Image: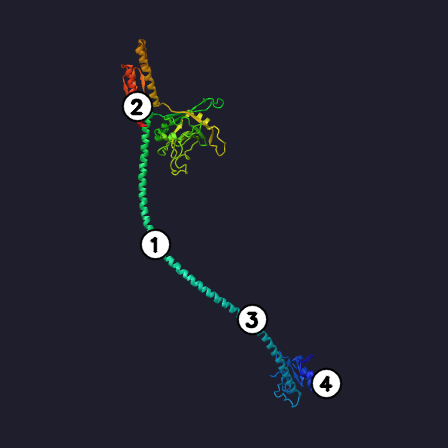
Amino acid sequence: GYGAGYSSPHQAAAAASPQYAQQQPPQQQPHAAQSPYGQQQAQYGGYPHSSSVGAGLGVSSGGGSDYGGAYGGYSEAASGDETKNGRKNKNSKRRPQPGSTAGTSMWWQITIVFVITTFMLFGATLHYRSRYTHAKKHHDHAITHHERNLQSHATAKTRAEAELKGKKEQIQFLEDRVADLTKQHTDVKTELADRVSNQNSIEERARKREDVLRGRMMHMQDRIARESHRATLERFGPGPHQVEFQVELPADPNNYATIPANPTILINLYTDDMPHAAHLFLEQIAHGLWNGCSFVVNAAHVFQVGAVRKESGESQMKYFAHKELDILAFQEYSPDHPHEQYTVGFAGRPAGPEFYINKMDNTESNGPGGQDHHDLNEEADPCFGKVDDSSITVLERLFGLPVVEENGPNDQFLVEPLHILSARIIGWVDPVEVTLAQKRQEEAVKEAAAKEANNDNAAEQQQQQQSDGRRRRFVGVSGFVLAGGQTRVAYPCHPGGGRFSDGGQLSQRCQLAQLYDYAAESRRKCRQRE
């Protein structure tokens, strides 16, 4: 601690002055080798020195001393010398001699320690002052930062308080609004409950009215069907009722050798189960409304007639409407007669006047609920007849007629419409034709009477004509039958009924007068019914 590797001031002084080393008692030098402190001990004024004085200051001190070294000539042998009896000598220490160099060395040690301590304290002061300055700067920066944060927090607090105040006002407004809406809801709920109660009563009343109206409608439908059946029997006889259509079609001996030119299609009508539809169809035929019309549609499922002229394409719907024979009064349907293959049905809602022949089984598509695009989808197309088996071959040929742009957008229409030459009711004669026949017969009788007045031979010819007239049989002409000398008169509007007269003894003039009266009455009744 004293430079040049010396551990004590004595060693340093001895190195500096050889005389100082010579003044040391020689008997004390071996004692240093006997010290238990090893090489760290040093000679100082004849006393050994061992441990350090002041940890961290580099000043050596003597062992066993509270002050850490030899002081004033005290011997270090107190810690190591023993008495002759093996005990330690308590009085082995010596007092320093006045004027010795040991005291001076101690003051030098104290001075050095003070200086070192001062420098250390000065250095520590500088160090801690630097740290203090840095900490103060950091602290000031932190204070500034915190002050800014506090200011921003104060601003945010002010803004938050303002927002909170606004939110409270909004909450108060919403609470008032909720209260108003709750009150309105209660009022509306009460009003709605009243309306629901009234609505229930209205619905109940409407349901009852609907049930009553439905019942009346069903009753009217039954009445219409019954009256239609009665009119069919009175006008067209008891049946069975058949309709025959003759179409304009050239013969095809190569493919259809059995089908003649201009073939016919025979249709059997369901007059008992479908009286209203069958009666409308019979009336259309009787008035000749389908004569001159055409088959125009050849779709995949139906072969349909259109109320149009083949030559001009003019619609004939106005003639059907003028006769009030265009549509049905209701959608008549019978589950006993579904739309099977080769059956006949009216098209449209309300149905009529156009009709079609089913090319396939259309029970589902044309039956009840099969056509959802109509308002009353529970209704069905009326199926009122079926093509007779004798006409199936003709139908197969008609179904094969070409269509416009096959597989295209217009593949349902025939290339050339199939013209209907005539449509008639089998076994029924029109009363108009009967009236014309009666007029022709009356003219013939008048002409014969004129010849009788001019020539005697005319009377003989008249008698011969009268005899021939009794034997002549008129079948199906206005219901008049002359055979075997009897005359059977039947009103055309009352098939199967009539009046009979024994004309065998009457003259030909009387018979003609009677026929004329009955014909006039028949025409009057027909006009009234129409």
What amino acid is found at the position of numbered circle 4 in the picture?
Answer: Pro
Q: Earlier in the sequence, mark 2 or mark 1?
A: 1
Element at label 4: helix
Q: Earlier in the sequence, mark 4 or mark 2?
A: 4
Residue 499 lies in quadrant: top left
Locate residue 95, reporting x and y percent: 63, 89
338 horizontally vs 68: left or right: left
Q: Which residue is mark 2?
A: 522
Q: Measure the C-alpha gap from mark 4 to mark 1.
A: 125 Å
Locate residue 12, reporting x and y percent: 69, 82
What amino acid is found at the position of numbered circle 2 in the picture?
Answer: Ser
Whether residue 496 is visible to the viewer of this picture, yes or no, is no
How was this image coloured? rainbow
Locate residue 145, reporting x and y percent: 53, 68
Q: Are marks 3 and 4 in contact (CB under 8 Å)?
A: no
Q: Earlier in the sequence, mark 3 or mark 2?
A: 3
Q: Residue at x 56, y 72 (%)?
A: 137
Element at label 2: helix
Q: Are marks 4 and 2 in contact (CB under 8 Å)?
A: no
Element at label 1: helix
Q: Residue at x 32, y 46 (%)?
A: 200
Q: Which residue is mark 4?
A: 18
